Image (cartoon, rainbow, N blue to C red):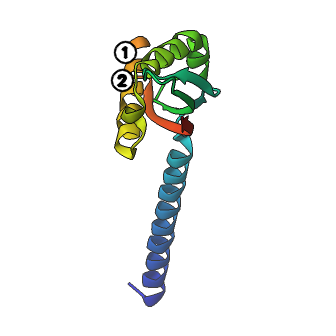
Amino acid sequence: MTNGKHVANILVLVAAFMLLLFSWGCKKEAKAEAVAPPAKYAMEAMVVNLADDDERYLKISIGFELAEGVTEALMKENENVIKDAVIMHLSAKYYHDIRAKDGKEKLKVEIMNTLNSVLKKKAIKTVYFTELIAQ
């Protein structure tokens, strides 16, 4: 083989390699774009009487990150059931249950488990308190 043929073969291999890298990068970008962010749902603020004898109350706003396949529409369809479950759960709490950080973290898990039970599916992935005032 002559030097010209070696150069041509090398150029063909480099071009094929570049094409392969380019197509792999495009597939990777397309795959990354295909993954949609998780759906979110927010409840408006609620005021709930706590179980304390001295008439304490809790004002709370809650946001949810929904599990894959769960839509905001499903949450809106079940809004009354969701609000009722949250109110019933919160009204059984005492001020000292939610005052400390670990109490709030525990409450998030309890609300998630309560709503997943009420909705009969793992609909809630994460609970966020966007407002929480206990007095």
Q: Which residue is outermost to the front?
A: 54
Quadrant of image for the C terminus? top right
Residue 69 badge: none
Question: Can the viewer see residue 47?
Answer: yes
Question: Could you say which quadrant of the image residue 105 lies in?
Answer: top left
Q: What type is the residue that disc 2 sits on?
A: Asn
Q: Which residue is outermost to the bottom?
A: 3
What residue did someone put label 2 on? 113
* Left or right: residue 123 compared with residue 62: left
From the viewer's side, name the closer residue of 21 and 115. Answer: 115
Q: Position of residue 70 (x, y in %)?
A: 50, 23
CB-based contact (under 8 Å), mark 1 and mark 2? yes
* Left or right: residue 125 compared with residue 25: left
Q: Is residue 25 above or below residue 31?
A: below
* Left or right: residue 65 compared with residue 98: right
Q: Position of residue 99 (x, y in %)?
A: 42, 40
Which residue occupies 59% across, 24% down? 47
SS for callout 2: helix
Q: Would you call the spot at circle 2 few (<14 residues within 10 Å), some (14-19), or many (20 or more)?
A: some
What residue did someone put label 1 on? 117
Quadrant of image for the N terminus? bottom left
SS for callout 1: helix
Q: What type is the residue that disc 1 sits on?
A: Ser
Q: Position of residue 113 (x, y in %)?
A: 36, 23
Q: Position of residue 2 (x, y in %)?
A: 42, 87
From the viewer's side, name the closer residue of 38 and 132. Answer: 132
From the viewer's side, name the closer residue of 3 and 53. Answer: 53
